[in-house]
């Protein structure tokens, strides 16, 4: 019985650490405006909302949409304001600042999908 609890603890710890690694990679990709790295962590399909337009995209389509957003709004910084864990997974809310002196709120939701953490929702709203 002790071995079962040890194995369960190990699996939960590994899953948590992987989720934290993905979270860091997603935040870095946002800060650098790297749509390719960001979209590599997207579920297929993924819900993307930029300002008031929300669509369901494949990960490849989402990469094109976000590449255009980052081109139009080159990054200066991304700062995580809040993160937490809900019933549906881990979420992050942060502020994206671009070179045009604009600020955007970014929200994304990570869920477990077949043993890996994937972004299921990615929302961008002008502040």
Image (spheres, rainbow, N blue to C red):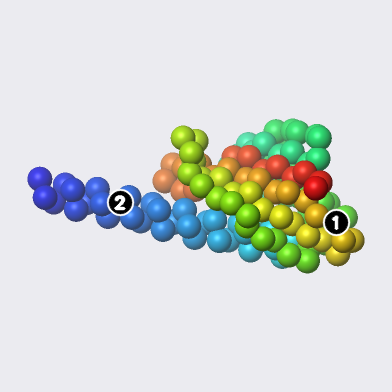
Is residue 65 shown to the viewer in this render? no
- Within 10 Å of disc 1 (Cα), the crowding (few <14, some 14-19, many 20+) is some
Q: Where's residue 106, x and y in %? A: 70, 49
Q: Is residue 41 left or right of residue 106?
A: left
Q: Residue at x 33, y 55 (%)?
A: 13
Residue 28 falls in which quadrant of the image? bottom right
Marks 1/2: CA–CA distance: 42 Å
The answer to whether marks 1 and 2 mark residues whose Cβ atoms lie closer than 8 Å is no
User: Is 25 displayed left or right of 99 in the figure?
Assistant: left
- Residue 60 horizontal/vertical position (percent): 70, 46
User: Viewer-proximal residue, 56 or 51?
Assistant: 51
Residue that badge 1 annotates? 102
* Point 32% across, 50% down: residue: 12
Q: Which residue is mark 2?
A: 11
Q: Position of residue 9 (x, y in %)?
A: 26, 52
Residue lying at the far left of the rendered structure: 1
Residue 18 visible in the current orientation: yes
């Amino acid at each position: 019985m002790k071995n079962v609890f040890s194995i369960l603890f190990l699996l939960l710890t590994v899953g948590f650490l992987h989720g934290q690694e993905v979270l860091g990679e997603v935040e870095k990709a946002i800060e650098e405006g790297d749509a390719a790295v960001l979209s590599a962590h997207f579920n297929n399909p993924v819900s993307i909302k930029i300002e008031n337009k929300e669509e369901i995209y494949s990960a490849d389509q989402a990469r094109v949409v976000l590449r255009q957003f980052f081109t139009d709004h080159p990054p200066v910084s991304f700062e995580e304001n809040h993160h937490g864990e809900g019933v549906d997974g881990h979420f992050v809310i942060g502020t994206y600042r671009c070179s045009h002196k604009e600020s955007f709120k970014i929200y994304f939701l990570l869920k477990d999908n077949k043993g890996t953490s994937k972004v299921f929702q990615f929302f961008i709203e002008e502040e």
